[in-house]
Amino acid sequence: MGIGLNILDNLRISIGEETAEIINALKRNSIGYSIPYQGQGHMIIFIETYGVELNTVKDQVVFIKSSNSKLNYIMKIGMNTPALVLAEIREKLAKNFNLPISKIRIDRFESTSFNSIMSIPYDEGHKVKISLVLGLNNGIYIETMQLVNT
């Protein structure tokens, strides 16, 4: 399942992806990165150019954090009511991750700030929690994705 962020048109980093594959893809695309921490089956990869941080456990991505950019932009909020905005967020996420909208669960939604947390089933015993925030120009952005136990 491709729950992740596009870094380039031809490069997507997804939850569950193997560390070696990511590093090879970054090198192939001449994308600079650093590894500020590595030890005990855990690694942090920082892609400064794109403001992306990856945390891996046992050589698989379990956490993605991104700054507000076109890479993780979901939508712009117009003059819609919070209920309509929430419905549109779910539709956009479903389209972005190629999932039925019924798979996207609303864990938290703040009607004044539009900050929210959605979850998507991942595999047996796991789900991906997606944190969304309101950014500049009334844009909704994915802030974090995290693989968690159910």
Image (spheres, rainbow, N blue to C red):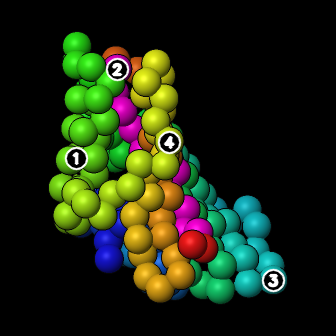
What residue would you read off at disc 2?
Answer: 138
Q: Residue at x 52, y 76 (%)?
A: 126
Q: Nearer the viewer, mark 1 or mark 4?
A: 4
Mark 3 vs mark 4, CA separation in Å: 33 Å
Q: Secondary structure at mark 3?
A: loop
Foreground: 30 or 121?
121
Mark 4 vs mark 2, CA separation in Å: 19 Å
Q: Of marks 2 and 1, which one's residue comes earlier in the chain?
A: 1
> Where in the figure is residue 63, as x and y percent of width and height?
57, 63
Looking at the rendering, in which quadrant would you find the C terminus?
bottom right
What residue would you read off at disc 1?
Answer: 92
Asked whether disc 1 touches disc 3, contact meaning CB atoms under 8 Å apart, the reply is no
What residue would you read off at disc 3?
Answer: 40
> Where in the figure is residue 46, as x and y percent of width and height?
60, 58
Vertical arrangement, residue 5 with respect to residue 92, above or below: below
Mark 1 vs mark 4, CA separation in Å: 17 Å
Q: Is residue 146 visible?
A: yes
Vertical arrangement, residue 23 with respect to residue 37, above or below: below
Category of crowding for the residue at label 2, using alpha-carbon neighbours closer than 10 angstroms: few (below 14), some (14–19), many (at least 20): some
Magenta part of the chain:
138-148
> Where in the figure is residue 26, as x and y percent of width and height?
43, 69
Left or right of 41 on screen, residue 73: left
Q: Residue at x 32, y 24 (%)?
A: 82
Looking at the rendering, in which quadrant would you find the N terminus?
bottom left
Q: Amino acid at mark 1?
A: Lys
> Where in the figure is residue 68, as x and y percent of width and height?
44, 36
Q: Secondary structure at mark 4?
A: strand
